[in-house]
Image: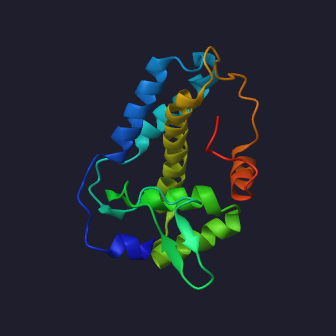
Amino acid sequence: IKTIHATPRFPELVNFMDGVDGFIADFQASKRLPERATAEHFAYYAEIQKHYPRYEGDLVSSHNDLNYNNILFDGKKVWIIDWEAAFANDRYVDLANVGNGFVATEELEERFLRAYFGDTLDEGKWARYYLMRQTCHFFYAMVMFKMIDVQLPPGATHDASMDTPRLSEFHQQIGAGEISLASY
């Protein structure tokens, strides 16, 4: 991640937080799920909107989609693929995406952030990382809902029960190949 962020800055495309806001607005307007199923989640996101420094200007070259499918290891070297979403962005997006997908314990989280920030890791950086992790969860949820709408069988509706595995379990199931995001 540090190597990507150190490259000459990619062109700017969109403010990530504004983009997430747009995806959420589209989702809410679509009425895909009843408001009771999402109200608590969007109330939390409204708190993030109030506090996250979205126009700070500390932009770096960012992949913006570092996940299981885009990080390959051949036994000797790490390969980053699928650069179509790359643009200048908040550094915390790449950190949060890797954290959400690969960092499963508090100990690993500490090591991960220290590897990136070194001795400059402080409470403010921890807080931004935490908030961006939540924001990236919202972003990917909104993207997934757009994708599954195409695959929803005619006349069917989404299950609004929210009876699902915890997020950490879900990540483990994806990593183990037990869940595929390629089908409804």
Q: Quadrant of the C terminus?
A: top right
Q: Quadrant of the N terminus?
A: bottom left
The mark tally for this picture is 0
Residue 29 located left or right of residue 12: right
Image point 44% across, 60% down: which residue?
Answer: 82
Where is residue 127? Give x, y as percent.
51, 54
Q: Is residue 72 above or below residue 67?
A: below
Where is residue 103? Give x, y as percent.
64, 63
Q: Is residue 22 above or below residue 8?
A: above
Q: Is residue 126 something that shows in the picture?
A: no
Most extreme residue toward the top is: 155
Q: Is residue 183 above or below residue 101?
A: above
Image point 46% across, 66% down: which residue?
Answer: 81
Residue 170 located left or right of residue 85: right
- Residue closer to the observer: 117 or 63: 63
Most extreme residue toward the bottom is: 76
Image point 49% across, 44% down: which residue?
Answer: 135
Where is residue 32? Give x, y as percent.
55, 20
Most extreme residue toward the front is: 154
- Residue closer to the observer: 53 or 32: 32
Where is residue 35? Give x, y as percent.
57, 17
Q: Is residue 47 above or below residue 155?
A: below
- Residue closer to the observer: 1 or 181: 181
